[in-house]
Image (cartoon, helix red, strand yellow):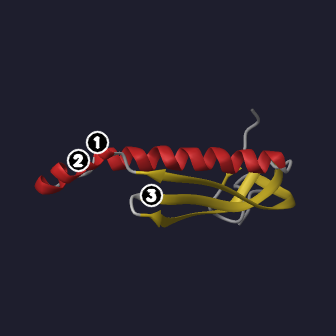
C-alpha cells in the first residue's frame, strides 16, 4: 500500500502540492459494549480514566483514518490536508466518528513552506 501524507494544516512540510483532488472522508459508527458499560459505570464510582472507552475511541480513530487514506488513494492522491475530526450521536449508545479533508498529490519540494 502506498504512503499517504496526512496533515491538519493546508500543506505537508517538505512537500509541494501539485494537484487538489477534492474532499475525502472516513466514517465509522460505533456502539458501546454492555460489558464495557458495566466496567465504565464501576470505574465512574471511584473516578479515573475509563480505559475501555479510551481504547474504543483509539480504535475508531485508526479505522476512520485508514478509510480516509483509502478514499484519497482511490482518487489518485498521496496526501490529505486540512484534516478535521467530527463526532455525532446517532442513537442512544451509538456515535459516529468522521474524519475529512482534501485529497492532494504532493511531491518533494526543494524549499520548505513558510
Closest to the observer, 100 or 56: 56
> Between marks 3 and 2, how big is the CA–CA gap?
16 Å
Tell me: 69 left or right of 31: right
Closest to the observer, 42 or 72: 42
Closest to the observer, 64 or 111: 64
> Between marks 1 and 3, how big is the CA–CA gap?
15 Å
- Residue that numbered label 3 is attached to: 94
Q: Residues within 10 Å of mark 3 (few under 14, many from 20)?
A: few
Tell me: 77 left or right of 88: right
Image quadrant where one finds the C terminus: bottom right
**Residue beneath the point at 44% across and 58% down:** 94
- Residue that numbered label 2 is attached to: 38
Q: Is residue 31 visible?
A: yes
Q: Residues within 10 Å of mark 1 (few under 14, many from 20)?
A: few
Task: Provide residue 74's location: percent of width, then percent of height.
Answer: 82, 46
Counting every numbered tag in the picture gives 3
Tell which circle, 3 or 2, labels the residue nearer the N-terminal end. 2
Q: Is residue 110 visible?
A: no
Task: Provide residue 83's location: percent of width, then percent of height.
Answer: 64, 61
> Between marks 2 and 1, how big is the CA–CA gap?
5 Å
Tell me: 68 left or right of 46: right
- Residue that numbered label 1 is attached to: 35
Where 65 falls versus 114 (above or below)?
Answer: above
Amino acid at each position: 500500500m502506498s504512503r499517504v501524507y496526512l496533515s491538519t494544516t493546508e500543506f505537508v512540510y517538505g512537500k509541494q502540492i501539485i494537484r487538489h483532488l477534492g474532499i475525502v472522508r472516513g466514517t465509522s459508527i460505533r456502539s458501546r459494549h454492555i460489558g464495557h458499560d458495566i466496567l465504565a459505570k464501576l470505574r465512574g464510582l471511584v473516578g479515573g480514566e475509563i480505559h475501555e472507552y479510551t481504547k474504543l475511541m483509539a480504535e475508531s480513530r485508526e479505522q476512520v483514518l485508514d478509510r480516509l487514506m483509502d478514499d484519497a488513494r482511490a482518487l489518485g492522491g498521496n496526501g490529505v490536508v486540512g484534516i478535521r475530526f467530527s463526532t455525532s450521536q446517532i442513537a442512544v449508545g451509538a456515535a459516529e466518528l468522521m474524519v475529512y479533508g482534501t485529497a492532494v498529490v504532493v511531491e518533494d519540494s526543494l524549499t520548505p513552506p513558510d
